[in-house]
Image (cartoon, rainbow, N blue to C red):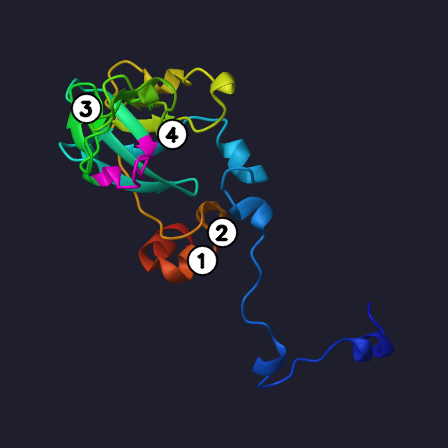
C-alpha cells in the first residue's frame, strides 16, 4: 500500500494541458518502415506476399505500391503475370499505360518491350547493331497466381523460397473464396487493431453486443 508521502510525489493531472503534451506519438520505424534496406522491409521481402486479387488483372496494367515501391502488375497475352518497376528505364514513362503483348509488355512512349522477368526483348529506335537489350534489364519481381490471389517475392533472387503450398489450401470438397480489404494505414496498425478486443465494444456496436454482452 502506498503511503501519503508517496502519493504526494506522484504527478498530478492538469486541465488545459495541450501546450505541454505532444499529441502525436513518434513512429517506431524499426517496425513500420518496410522500404528496401530497412530491417522490417528486408524481413518481409523474404516471403511470398499476396498483393491483389487475380480477378483485378484484366486487359490493362495496374499501378500499385508494394513495400514502398512503385510497381505495375499486368497479365500478358499468353496469360503470364508480370510485376515490374513502374517507370520505363528508357525515358521514365509509366508502364501503367503500357501495352500487354504476347510476351510481356510494351512501353507506350517508345515501344521498348519488356518480358515479365524484366529482360528487354526489343528496343525500337536503336540502331540495328545495338546490343543494348543484351546489356541492361528492367526491375522485375516473380509473381504467381494461386487460389485467386497474386503473390510476389521481392527479396534477393538467390534466397527465393518455394511457394508455401499449405495443406489447408488443398482440402477436399472445400471451395476457397479470395477477398481483399483495403486498409489506408501501416501494416502494424492493422495487426495491433486485431489484438485489441475492447475497441470492438465501442466501435463495432453489433459485434460488441454479441460477444461482450452480460447474461
Cα gap from disc 1 to disc 2, whole angstroms: 6 Å
Cα gap from disc 4 to disc 1, whole angstroms: 42 Å
Q: In the structure shown, which secondary structural element does the residue marked by tag 2 occupy?
A: loop
Looking at the image, residue 211 sits to the left or right of residue 17; the answer is left
Q: Label 3, on which residue? A: 76
Quarter of the view holding residue 180: top left
Residue 170 lies within the magenta run: no
Q: Are marks 3 and 1 in contact (CB under 8 Å)?
A: no
Q: How many C-alpha atoms fall within 10 Å of the one at disc 4: few (<14), some, or many (≥20)?
A: some
N-terminal-most mark, 2 or 4:
4
Write the start and end of the magenta stretch as one range. Answer: 84-96
Q: Are marks 1 and 2 in contact (CB under 8 Å)?
A: yes
Where is residue 4 shown, x and y percent of the image?
A: 84, 78
N-terminal-most mark, 4 or 3:
3
> Which of label 2 and label 3 is nearer to you?
3
Looking at the image, residue 27 sits to the left or right of residue 93; the answer is right
| Position above or below: 48 against 192 | above
Q: In the structure shown, which secondary structural element does the residue marked by tag 3 occupy?
A: loop
Q: How many C-alpha atoms fall within 10 Å of the one at disc 3: few (<14), some, or many (≥20)?
A: many
Quadrant of image for the N terminus: bottom right
Q: Looking at the image, which residue is at 38% across and 60% down? A: 203
Quarter of the view holding residue 63: top left
Q: In the structure shown, which secondary structural element does the residue marked by tag 4 occupy?
A: loop
Q: Looking at the image, which residue is at 40% across and 62% down? A: 202
Q: Label 1, on which residue? A: 199
- Which disc is residue 139 wearing? 4
N-terminal-most mark, 4 or 1:
4
Amino acid at each position: 500500500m502506498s503511503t501519503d508521502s508517496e502519493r504526494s510525489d506522484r504527478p498530478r493531472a492538469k486541465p488545459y494541458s495541450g501546450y505541454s503534451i505532444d499529441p502525436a506519438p513518434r513512429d517506431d520505424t524499426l517496425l513500420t518502415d518496410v522500404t528496401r534496406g530497412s530491417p522490417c522491409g528486408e524481413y518481409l521481402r523474404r516471403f511470398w506476399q499476396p498483393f491483389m486479387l487475380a480477378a483485378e488483372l484484366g486487359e490493362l496494367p495496374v499501378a500499385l505500391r508494394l513495400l514502398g515501391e512503385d510497381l505495375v502488375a499486368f497479365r500478358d497475352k499468353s496469360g503470364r503475370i508480370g510485376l515490374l518497376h513502374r517507370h520505363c528505364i528508357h525515358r521514365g514513362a509509366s508502364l501503367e499505360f503500357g501495352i500487354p503483348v504476347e510476351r510481356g509488355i510494351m512501353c507506350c512512349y517508345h515501344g521498348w518491350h519488356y518480358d515479365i522477368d524484366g529482360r528487354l526483348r526489343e528496343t525500337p529506335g536503336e540502331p540495328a547493331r545495338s546490343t543494348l537489350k543484351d546489356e541492361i534489364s528492367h526491375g522485375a519481381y516473380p509473381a504467381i497466381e494461386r487460389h485467386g490471389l497474386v503473390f510476389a517475392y521481392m527479396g534477393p533472387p538467390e534466397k527465393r523460397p518455394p511457394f508455401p503450398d499449405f495443406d489447408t489450401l488443398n482440402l477436399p470438397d472445400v471451395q476457397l473464396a479470395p477477398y481483399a480489404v483495403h486498409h489506408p494505414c501501416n501494416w502494424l496498425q492493422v495487426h495491433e487493431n486485431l489484438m485489441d478486443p475492447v475497441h470492438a465494444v465501442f466501435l463495432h456496436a453489433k459485434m460488441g453486443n454479441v460477444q461482450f454482452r452480460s447474461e
